[in-house]
Image: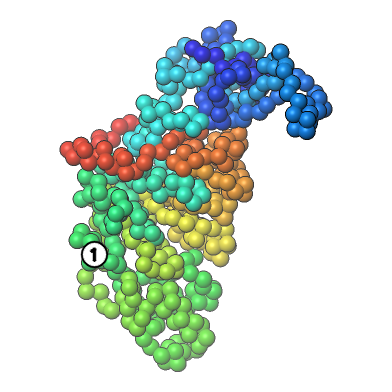
């Protein structure tokens, strides 16, 4: 095996220092191995590379000046001895015999360091049902070493996908959802603000998968897609809780909404919007200020995007068909993927749609567990995927009051409901929420504040990966989770390519659920 360096120092729990061979090609993120006299094999990850010299800094500066100003070309007979590179490496695992141990020892001085080879890839011991990519060594991916993640652990304990624009957040999400689609045990609800997950108009999406019959697609433009369902919400199905923490409401306005719901019943929104302000004021015996009534009317018209009695999604008419909530409940029970296209509505309308659906799902699961725990065991786990997470989980939003997204972040794992939050700016999320997202898929973050937010809330120590996180290219990821042994460097599959492979084998059957190791 090729030797690329020698151990020259380090500490357990810190970094191992390696002097590199002059012609060794070593990059941040590379995985290397080291054997010493104990016959134990150390697996390490390069976290930094630097240049060093036995010559003092002043002499080096003088030599550089001579080269620059006078074109003096020094010929040093011992140049390889005097100028060299040092790598810092992070210990990942130790193999002792046939067992893999946590790194509680350190290799000896002058131990040989070599690139990892195919015989040693067994130290990446991740058992899962959802294939998401290949093991990555620095900038190179090892196509023969596939990385699959354990669905149950990830879904119920929440996921956070973070990356700057163009780094591959949506591609990862589609690859992960494709994995769920190929399993029988799970369901997912996807709120799609850019209409990119379902696919169409030249862009590949989940509808192009051989198991497309497992997908339910709700959209305002349902007439353009033969298999789509209309995204329509009757306001009489809405409750005041669907608005709390989602749109900006004062305490007085929230109390008024609760009062309207108790007095008017299910048609409370229709009554509020249709009746004159003066009439409502008199009807409630001046218990509600006219200004509060008028402000609520204005906010409801705006939030629901109503023109008269109906809008693109919301309708104040009496319900004449099964509600979208009943349809989603049925689809979840059938272990389907539900995609909700919110690309044609504004931010507040989108948040009300997603919050109201999420409220019903969570309430259904929570009540089922309390009613019959044995029956609840047969309920599928549900992943709720949404983008631009700070809009519903940001520090400023939650400072105004809690909402269903925060509640599920805290309690969802007890009731088989998990979140997959996607964001470019994790620094806008509260530390407590970040800590609840046990699995983090990091696809490249150039901003120091965002890197710090993810590093400081990760379930594993990834402080040494901060520089690598900054340098990650499109599709390159670091995945950290309490359900894997160490932060995994991964090259995420390209969705279009795995989709092409799926369609080559159209006789796809649902993958049986395997145990999680």
Chosen colour scheme? rainbow
What is the tally of numbered marks visible in this picture? Answer: 1
Q: Nearer the viewer, residue 109 or 125?
A: 109
Residue drawn 62% across and 15% down? 6
Image quarter in which the C terminus is found: top left
Residue 396: image quadrant is: bottom right
Q: Is residue 472 visible?
A: yes
Mark 1 residue element? helix
Residue 383: percent from the left, percent from the top? 37, 49
Furthest toward the top, the residue is: 37
Residue drawn 35% across and 58% down? 195
Q: Which residue was labeled with disc 1?
A: 224
Furthest toward the left, the residue is: 507
Residue drawn 40% across and 65% down? 350
Residue 357: percent from the left, percent from the top? 35, 61
Q: Is residue 437 above or below residue 78?
A: below
Q: Residues within 10 Å of mark 1 (few under 14, many from 20)?
A: few
Q: Is residue 366 visible?
A: no
Residue drawn 33% across and 59% down? 340
Residue 453: percent from the left, percent from the top? 59, 47
Residue 414: percent from the left, percent from the top? 41, 47
Q: Nearer the viewer, residue 466 or 426?
A: 466
Q: Is residue 439 above or below residue 338?
A: above
């Amino acid at each position: 095996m090729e030797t690329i360096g020698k151990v020259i120092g380090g500490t357990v729990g810190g970094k191992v220092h390696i002097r590199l061979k002059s012609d060794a090609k070593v990059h941040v993120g590379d995985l290397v191995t080291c054997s010493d006299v104990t016959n134990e094999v150390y697996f390490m990850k390069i976290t930094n590379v630097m240049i060093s010299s036995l010559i003092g800094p002043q002499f080096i500066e003088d030599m550089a000046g001579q080269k620059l100003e006078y074109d003096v070309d020094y010929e040093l007979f011992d140049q390889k001895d005097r100028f060299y590179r040092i790598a810092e490496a992070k210990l990942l695992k130790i193999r002792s015999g046939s067992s893999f141990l946590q790194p509680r020892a350190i290799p000896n001085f002058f131990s040989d360091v070599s690139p990892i080879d195919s015989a040693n890839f067994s130290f990446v011991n991740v058992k899962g049902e959802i294939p998401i990519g290949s093991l990555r060594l620095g900038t190179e991916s090892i196509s023969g070493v596939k990385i699959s993640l354990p669905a149950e652990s990830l879904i119920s304990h929440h996921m956070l996908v973070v990356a700057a624009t163009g780094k591959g957040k949506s591609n990862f999400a589609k690859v992960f959802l494709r994995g769920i689609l190929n399993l029988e045990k799970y369901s997912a609800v996807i709120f799609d603000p850019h209409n990119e997950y379902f696919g169409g108009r030249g862009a590949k999406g989940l509808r192009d998968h051989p198991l497309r019959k497992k997908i339910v697609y709700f959209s305002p433009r349902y007439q353009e897609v033969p298999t789509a369902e209309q995204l329509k919400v009757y306001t009489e199905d809405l409750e005041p809780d669907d608005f709390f923490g989602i749109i900006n409401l004062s305490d007085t306005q929230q109390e008024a909404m609760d009062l309207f719901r108790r007095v008017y019943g299910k048609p409370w929104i229709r009554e509020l919007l249709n009746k004159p302000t003066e009439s409502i004021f008199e009807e409630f015996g001046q218990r509600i200020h006219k200004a509060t009534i008028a402000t609520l009317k204005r906010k409801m018209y705006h939030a629901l995007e109503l023109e008269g009695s109906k809008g693109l999604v919301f309708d104040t008419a009496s319900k004449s068909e099964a509600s979208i909530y009943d349809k989603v409940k049925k689809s979840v029970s059938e272990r389907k993927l539900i995609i909700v296209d919110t690309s044609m509505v504004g931010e507040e309308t989108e948040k009300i749609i997603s919050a109201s659906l999420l409220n019903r799902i969570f309430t259904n699961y929570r009540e089922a567990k309390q009613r019959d725990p044995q029956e609840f065991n047969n309920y599928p786990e549900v992943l709720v995927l949404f983008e631009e997470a700070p809009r519903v989980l940001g520090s400023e939003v939650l400072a105004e009051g809690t909402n269903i997204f925060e509640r599920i972040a805290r309690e969802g794992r007890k009731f088989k409901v998990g979140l997959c939050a996607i964001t470019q700016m994790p620094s806008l999320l509260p530390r407590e929420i970040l800590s609840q997202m046990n699995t983090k898929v990091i696809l490249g973050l150039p901003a120091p504040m965002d890197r710090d937010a993810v590093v400081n809330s990760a379930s594993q120590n990834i402080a040494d990966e901060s520089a690598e996180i900054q340098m990650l290219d499109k599709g390159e990821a670091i995945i950290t989770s309490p359900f894997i042994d160490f932060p995994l460097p991964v090259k995420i599959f390209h969705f279009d390519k795995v989709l092409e492979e799926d369609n080559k084998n159209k006789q796809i059957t649902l993958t049986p659920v395997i145990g999680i190791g």
